[in-house]
Image: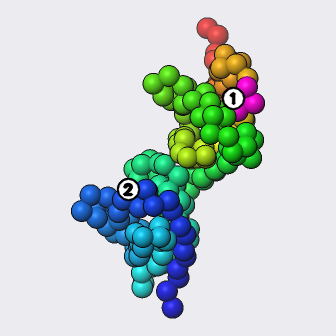
Amino acid sequence: MNQKTYLKIPLDRVGVLIGPKGKVKKRIEDSYGVTLNVESQSGSVEVVLNQGAEDVSVIFSVRNIIKAIGRGFSPRRAEILANEGFDLHILDLTSFVGNSRNALNRVKGRIIGKDGRSRALLEELTETRISVYGYTIGIIGNDEGLRVAGDAIMMLVKGAFHKTVWNFLYAYRRKMKKERSVIWYEGPKPKTKLS
């Protein structure tokens, strides 16, 4: 019996999932040992694990990749979700600013920034990937990155100055670099003989 799962993506993202001449769909199928049945009129996607596949959990990775593509990520950026330790988190902006188109556009503009610079800096400082699509913000990263990026985005949604958010993120980066340097150092300093 084949393992399968279903999900739905926005109609305007179906073409991205399929790709030019079906290349993206084929790459996903070949890379992960699945078959994708895409219904282009409804946006429904069935992910079927191929016969003989050994790792059943791959179906959930593929589901997350497709979900990320549906939330505005490029297929290449979404495929990092196949790596262990990476997850997708989606923030629904209407939960925080309501359904007002003006409020949504204002908040999305604050997160993206001029020429995409705010989003790029958020991604760099939190080691995440961020997509602003429709009324949602998608974040791909490890647990720590997801938490910090989510906190920074919520600060922007609630109206914090960009400088305040960047200071918060730079402090986080300093802390992470310090912790990483401690992790790399694993023992007492060697004793040197004085001559």
Helix, strand or loop under label 1: helix
The residue furthest bottom is: 1
Looking at this view, is 57 or 132 the one in front? 132
Q: Residue at the location (55% across, 76% down)?
A: 5
Q: Residue at the location (75% across, 30% down)?
A: 158
Disc 1 residue type (three-letter): Leu
Question: Is 190 placed above or below 46 here?
Answer: above
CA neighbours of label 2 inside 10 A, class few (<14), some (14 to 19), many (20+): many
Q: Quadrant of the C terminus?
A: top right
**Residue occupied by mark 2:** 16
Looking at this view, is 16 or 175 the one in front? 16
Q: Position of residue 87 (x, y in %)?
A: 60, 53
Q: Position of residue 75 (x, y in %)?
A: 41, 53
State left or right for residue 82 relative to residue 20.
right
Q: Quadrant of residue 184?
A: top right
Helix, strand or loop under label 2: helix
Q: Residue at the location (63% across, 50% down)?
A: 90
Q: Position of residue 92 (x, y in %)?
A: 67, 48
Q: Total marks drawn?
A: 2
The residue furthest left is: 21
Disc 2 residue type (three-letter): Val
Circles 2 and 1: CB atoms closer than 8 Å: no
Q: Would residue 18 be counted in the magenta stretch?
A: no
Q: Gap in Å between the C-alphas at discs 2 and 1?
A: 29 Å
**Residue occupied by mark 1:** 156
Which labelled disc corresponds to residue 185?
none
State left or right for residue 77 relative to residue 195.
left
Q: Which residues are magenta?
A: 155-159
